[in-house]
Amino acid sequence: MDTTPQNSRDLTLLEQIEKDPDISQASMAQQLGVAVGTVNWHLKRLVSKGYVKVKRAQRKKLRYIITPEGIALRARLTVEYVERSLYLYRDTRKNVTDLIDELRESGYDSVHISGSNLGPDDLVDICRLTCLEQNIALVDDPILPKLQIKGKNIELVYTE
């Protein structure tokens, strides 16, 4: 399973084109958070591989059409994305469950979740759900042991 950022970008571009065949490269670039030149490069590559066709809709306006091969690529990339997401969910859940077992063995029934990225993050949500399912109270007490999230890693940290 190829999980390159390029595949993720290709999937996003194909989804955007499917939603709006008249979308501009500038709009795609803005939605992706990349330069227009990056979108242009990816689109040229998708066109050269036969996944997308380009037709002139107006003098300066282009229309992008996903070919049958492009539809098949989008389906494959979508399946890969779902598989990666499920793997991340299952792996994270197993790791957190193991850490909860360790927490219980140490005599605790509550935990503090912390990390540098505590915004709306999938890993934080998985940690919270797993704790709730395991009857571990979530508290905002930095003195208690904490599930420390660092990037994609989660560890149990005891404060003494």
Image (cartoon, rainbow, N blue to C red):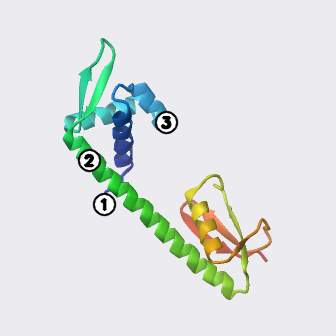
Tell me which corner region of the image, top left, top right, bottom left or bottom right, holds residue 65: top left
Q: In the rendered image, is residue 35 in sight?
A: no
The residue pinned by badge 1 equals 1
Q: Residue at x 25, y 26 (%)?
A: 54
Mark 2: few, some, or many residues within 10 Å (few <14, many ≥20)? Answer: some
Q: Are marks 1 and 2 in contact (CB under 8 Å)?
A: no
The residue pinned by badge 2 equals 73
Which numbered disc, 2 or 3, marks the residue that appears first in the sequence?
3
Question: The residue under label 3 is which amino acid type?
Answer: Gly
Question: The residue under label 1 is which amino acid type?
Answer: Met
Q: Point out the residue furthest to the top here.
A: 59
Q: Residue at x 31, y 21 (%)?
A: 62
Question: The residue under label 2 is which amino acid type?
Answer: Leu
What number is the disc on residue 33? 3
Q: x and y percent of residue 10 in the render?
A: 34, 42
Q: x and y percent of residue 61 in the render?
A: 33, 17
Work out how far the residue at label 1 is from the one at label 2, CA to CA, in angstroms.
13 Å
Q: In the rendered image, is residue 152 in sight?
A: yes
Work out how far the residue at label 2 is from the one at label 3, CA to CA, in angstroms.
23 Å
**Observer-nearest of 152 and 93:** 93
Mark 1: few, some, or many residues within 10 Å (few <14, many ≥20)? Answer: few
Q: Are marks 2 and 3 in contact (CB under 8 Å)?
A: no
Q: Is residue 8 left or right of residue 45?
A: right
Which part of the image, by quadrant, shows the C terminus? bottom right
Counting labels gives: 3
What number is the disc on residue 40? none
Q: Residue at x 49, y 36 (%)?
A: 33
Q: Is residue 101 left or right of residue 8?
A: right
Q: Nearer the viewer, mark 2 or mark 3?
A: 2
